[in-house]
Amino acid sequence: MSPARMAARLLRLYPVSWRVRYGDELETLILDMSGGDRVPWRIRTDVAVAGGRERLRAAGLGGDSPDARVRGGAGLVLWAWALFVVAGAIVQKTSEHWQQVLPAGSHTTATVAFGGLIGVAIAAAALVVAGIALTLPALRRLVRDGGWAQIRRPVTRAVAITAVFIAATIGLVAWAHGLSPRDRQGHDTAYALFATAWALLGAATLGSWTLAATRTAACLTLPGSLLRLEARLATAVAVALGVIAAATAVWWVSVANLAPTALTGSLSNRGSAFVPQLVLAMVLMLVALGLAGGGARRATRALPHLAGDD
Amino acid sequence: MTTRSRSDEATAGRSNDPPVLILTSLAAGEKHGYALLQDIEEFAGVRLGPGTLYGAIGRLEERGLIEAVGDSGRRRPYRLSPAGAEALRVALDGLRAIVDEGSARLARRPAAGRSPTGSPA
């Protein structure tokens, strides 16, 4: 690949706003450093990592100052929570009929684990809502002082995706109303495809609002006391996510031991404990736990370097 | 009522931090990206990558510590702003304090061949 093409490809790793400002200069520098030969791997790696860093900053998750590290760390925890919501929805769908399939009186551990994960999930959601609610006065100040232009794009995008999701939900409900329970369980291929697309759209809606939240948070003027509180809330959410993941694993193992066929998401007696959806949910949870742990650590470690309120 | 980091004032604390290297290089006069890399390698022996360089340039420009010279161009030069000169002074003072302390501690060390307690090794 020619150096010019490689340089252009590497630049695409950066956010558009960054490219508009520095793209030409960085491209020229890459070509100058490559001396007309192929772009060395050292340069490719350096530019790719730096591009990723700029993407994180653009999403409100990067930055070197203690203030930015707290916001970025809390933002990572928020992304982790969003991933857990998606994983939780998968677990919920998979666990629809598990209690009916297990032998009566045999599911104490599974019941306790499942009840625990529901309770902690509600607590985690309450912590996230509290963390967002605490920033609302700062958001009101931002909008009042003319900062709407800074957050307009991610917010309008999220609103648009949400509108499409609501329309799709109405269509899905109307469609499901005319189907038999058997068809709704996957025997109607067209409906199953639409339901899958709807689920993906739901995940995209959640993702778009999470992006809007982290980008908005990066624009807010927050006092040190509030940043400290947000860091602690983020840490509490990260711990809660760890408990949810552990409870899900205990529930899964417990149910799998008692009745492997209980996890197929239907009343059918065919199936295995290794349901692909549950495997996917656990993988999502593990990825999210990594994000949450990293985010909480980043926010907490920045706390001693935060100055007091001016 | 915003929070400001203690390290914001000093830009960076290590001599091989890209912001300190860039500010030091620009203290000698305006330079574009490639000239900056060459100068930094010459005086510090550090080979910065182009992504790292422009990441740091973006940050420094955002904080008003350096300024682009001219409105456009693919080899746009940068220069140190007055705030950048002050930030470099603060960063160098911090580094100097470490150098002085390290030198003093080395001078207080027992002579070679002796353990810290003074007994022969």
Image: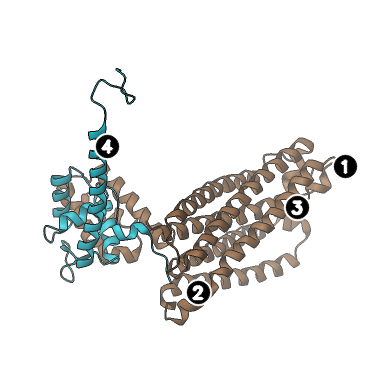
Which residue sits at x=24%, y=51%? B50
Which structural element holds mark 4? helix
Estimate the spatial distance between the alpha carbons at disc 3 and disc 4, rounded to whole Å.
68 Å
**Pointer 2 residue:** A139
Percent across and percent down for residue A60 are: 43, 62
Q: Answer yes or no: are tags 3 and 4 on the same subunit.
A: no
- Asked if badge 1 and badge 4 are on a common chain, one would say no
The disc labelled 3 sits on which kind of residue?
A: Glu
Q: Nearer the viewer, mark 1 or mark 3?
A: 1
Q: Are marks 4 and 2 in contact (CB under 8 Å)?
A: no
Per the rendering, the mark at residue A105 is 1
3D distance between C-alphas at marks 1 and 4: 71 Å
Does label 3 or label 2 sit earlier along the sequence?
A: 3
Task: Point out residue B95 in the picture as x, y percentages from the top left corner.
Answer: 25, 49
Q: Nearer the viewer, mark 1 or mark 4?
A: 4
Question: Residues at badges 3 and 2 in contact (C-beta under 8 Å)?
Answer: no
Q: Residue under label 4, please give it.
A: B105
| Position in image of residue A6 (x %, y %) | 26, 51
- Real-space Cα separation, disc 4 to disc 2, in angstroms: 51 Å
Q: Label 2 is found on which chain of the structure?
A: A
Q: Which chain is brown?
A: A
Q: Amino acid at mark 1?
A: Gly
Check residue A96 in the rendering and tell me which mark sits there, or answer none: 3
- Please state which amino acid type lies under the numbered disc 4: Arg
Q: Chain of mark 4?
A: B
Where is A29 relative to B83, above or below? above
Element carrying mark 3: loop
Q: Residue furthest front?
A: B118
> Badge 3, how many Cα within 10 Å: few under 14, some, many 20+?
some
